[in-house]
Image (cartoon, rainbow, N blue to C red):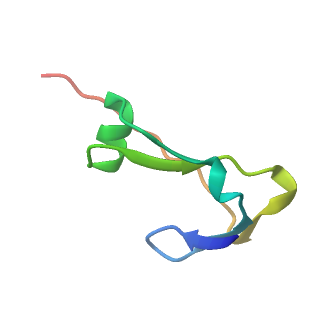
Amino acid sequence: MKINGGCHCGDLAYEAEIAPARVGICHCHSCQILSGTPFRTGVHVPVDKFHLRGGPPCALSLIHISA
């Protein structure tokens, strides 16, 4: 199955060919924080079936400041 998506700003997009049986969900605390929901959906994709469009990608740094 073909899927596509991208970042919120629209500068980076992806296309992938996935096997629907490889889609899974995770309920761990980190995934709940990352997604802002009770679970996060993910899928394993072989490198040769994943293509970035646009770009170039950049890194996101998170900084935790404690009071």
Question: How many numbered dots are placed on residues in this image?
Answer: 0
Location of residue 65 (image quadrant): top left
Quadrant (top left, top right, bottom left, bottom right) of the N terminus: bottom right
Q: Residue furthest right?
A: 48
Location of residue 54 (image quadrant): bottom right
Q: Image check: 33 left or right of 56?
A: left
Q: Image check: 32 left or right of 12?
A: left
Q: Residue furthest top?
A: 67
For the point 64% across and 51% down, which residue is it? 21
For the point 65% across and 48% down, which residue is it? 22
Q: Image check: 30 left or right of 1?
A: left
For the point 44% across and 70% down, which residue is it? 8
> In the rendered image of this protein, does residue 59 appear above or below residue 65?
below
> In the rendered image of this protein, does residue 50 appear above or below residue 8?
above
Q: Residue furthest front?
A: 21
Closer to us: 39 or 54: 39
**Can you give x and y, in whole percent of width and height, for residue 40 in the image?**
40, 46
For the point 87% across and 57% down, which residue is it? 48
> In the rendered image of this protein, does residue 53 appear above or below residue 29?
below
**Can you give x and y, in whole percent of width and height, for residue 13 in the image?**
62, 72
Q: Residue furthest left?
A: 67
Quadrant (top left, top right, bottom left, bottom right) of the C terminus: top left
Q: Image check: 26 left or right of 13?
A: left
**Can you give x and y, in whole percent of width and height, for residue 55 in the image?**
67, 69
Closer to us: 26 or 14: 26
**Can you give x and y, in whole percent of width and height, for residue 43 in the image?**
61, 50
